Amino acid sequence: MDEDIIGMIDESMKIKEGEIIKGKVVKVTGGDVLVDVGLKSEGIIPSSEFKKTTVPDVGDEVLVLLEKIENDEGMVVLSKEKADIMHVWNTVRESYEAGGYVEGKIVKTVKGGFQVDLGGINSFLPGSQVDFQPVSPEDYIGTIHNFKILKLSEGRKNIVISRRAILEEDMEKKREETWQKVEKGAILEGKVKNITDYGAFIDLGGVDGLLHIGDITWGRLSHASEVLKIGDTVKVLVLDCDREQQRIALGRKHLSPHPWEDIDKKYKVGSIVTGKAVSITDYGAFVELEPGVEGLVHISEFSWTQKVRKPSEFISLGDIVEVKILSVDKEQQRMSLSIRSLVENPWVGATERHPVGSSVKGIIRKFTNYGAFVELEDGIEGLLHIKDISWTKRISHPADELKSGQEIECKVLSIDQETHRLSVGLKQIEEDPLKKFVEEHAIGDIIPDAIITRVLDKGIVVDIGVEGFVPYSQMQDPPSELRRRYSIGDKIAVRLIEINEEKRRLIFSQSGYEPLLEKEKGKPKIKREDEEEKVAKEMKVEIVADKEKEVEIAADKEKEVEIAADKEMKVEIAADKEKVVEIAADKEKEVEIVADKKKVGTAKKKVKGKKKDKAKVKKEDRDKDVKKDKGKKKIIGKKSIKDKEEDKEKKKVKKKKVDVKKKKDLEEDKKTKGRKKSKEKGETEDKKKPKKSKKKTSKIKAKKKE
């Protein structure tokens, strides 16, 4: 008995306050639990401290914190809650030192992140340490995860944890496993992580690969989102890989056979198929028959009859159209399609149905500035040019004479079945009035009732069944009297003087036809050809005379210009002479002024000398005879110096006058030389000018007399 007591005392001596010890539940009451820890009394622990576990039963062992061995009442003070917290701190410290993980529950959001419960201890989880990408708080509150301790401060009770660090470690392991699988030609499975304009990134398990938009499908794609969505699981083929640069190129379309491999079996030339318009250009439209198989409908293959300028006016993107296969090139992967080939070509046999020269009926469909288009039948239109509408009228626009939808009868002028072009004429239905007029009239005939249709500055236009022109040179009245004397609708008598069938031109004359008629009475009629030759000769003679007159007028003008130039030269020379004379006079005046100034200076010097001489004379009277002699010598010396200075000044004046004369002579020599040169130039120009031959002048006079 004594030994047991001694053993208990020894054990109690080993237990220290602040340590976690084991205890045994002795009794459980309504709100308390009695725990025996081997001391002289039991400790009472409130049942509310057993939060994580249920309230223990009698005989169960529990870990408790010994706060005090004996309080004022002699009882042992124990705490289950503090024991749990201390236990958590110990495990947290051990895991922090060892680099391990701790489990915790995300409780709520705080500024900059989340608050996490690590089993009774609160810790801080930054928002950037939750996942690789930003997250929404609602998805994580209340969830339990493993965390890695980044920072631990027991004094401040501060713990910073990270979930992303664990994910990165797991990702690194996955990367290593994935890179062992990645090789060129390998087929892998991954998830669509991100979609861009140029493709999609596929997560292969810690490693991302690029699936380019051109490698997704054999068909045409404007954006990868048309086929893929984020989170989709896809199978891909490794096209290329570089572990050093962490790059992987993937392909999806390569897992299916190329659509052009058996294109000959699927699509044969001449067959009719349906497709979708996927692209429209200026030269046509591309139609997709299946993913990866496209054909071009050229702009010329849209319609037999319509001129399609923009394919977008005929077809739109996304339209389902029916086309006919014209050709297939497997090597170049090209296919040409046609829409118009679905209908028969209306131009086949058009030359037999509408031969050149035949009369046809058509409906006017549209106008242009140069004519109108006439529809002869469905799909065949002909051009009625503006010059083929009327023989006589001058039409500025076809709409002035025709109406849209009007039915007309016309004649086929030309037809080209290959280029699908046909031209028709409206005036060709009737006989050409010019030919009829030429057949019925000859040069010299007088038309008494020509109607004036226009009055111009150059003459008047008349209507005699066809249009003719009377120039003012062939009128009785001068040009200034034309508009006052004549008006539209007046009738005048004219005489035919010229016919030009190629240019469709008739020239008439009004002046002088009456005397000609009186002279020609009783004379036999001259043949039309002879009369035309006479008129032509007369016209040539007049033209030659007019040209010679123009040459003479031009020569006279040149002479007048030369005379005016000579007069200007003479005026300039006279002005130059006057200037030279004025300059010489100015210089002479300057010389005279300088001479006068010098004379005044010498006179002043003489006066001063005389004054000095008088003073010296007075002194000499007082002094001795010797001094008088010395004074006389000095005066003589001074006089000789003054004479020398005057001589020098005179010489200088003479030299200046000589220099002025020399300059005048030089200037006159230069002017005379300039005159000689100008005369020589004039003579050479006169020699170069062609002299009129006496023979030509005599011929001109003879022609005028005739």
Image (cartoon, helix red, strand yellow):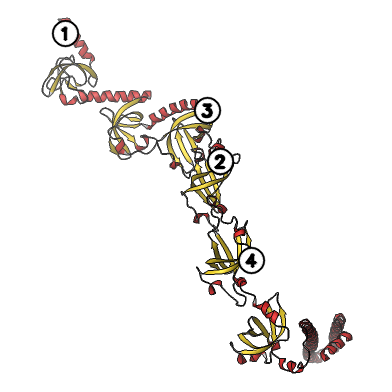
Q: Position of residue 389 (x, y in %)?
A: 59, 72
Residue 297 seen in the current view: yes
Q: Are marks 2 and 3 in contact (CB under 8 Å)?
A: no
The disc at residue 117 is: none
Dot 4 corresponds to which residue? 357
Q: Position of residue 242 (x, y in %)?
A: 54, 31
* Disc nearer the start of the sequence (3/1): 1
User: Which amino acid, mark 3?
Assistant: Glu
| Mark 1 or 4, closer to the camera | 4
Q: Could you say which quadrant of the image residue 356 lies in?
A: bottom right
Q: Are marks 1 and 4 in contact (CB under 8 Å)?
A: no
* Disc nearer the start of the sequence (1/4): 1
Dot 1 corresponds to which residue? 5
User: Which amino acid, mark 4?
Assistant: Gly
The disc at residue 268 is: 2
User: Compared with residue 314, is residue 6 higher up or lower down, i.e. above or below?
Assistant: above
User: Compared with residue 131, is residue 303 higher up or lower down, i.e. above or below?
Assistant: below
* Disc nearer the start of the sequence (2/3): 3
> Gap in Å between the C-alphas at discs 3 and 4?
79 Å
User: Which amino acid, mark 2?
Assistant: Lys
Name the secondary structure under disc 3.
loop
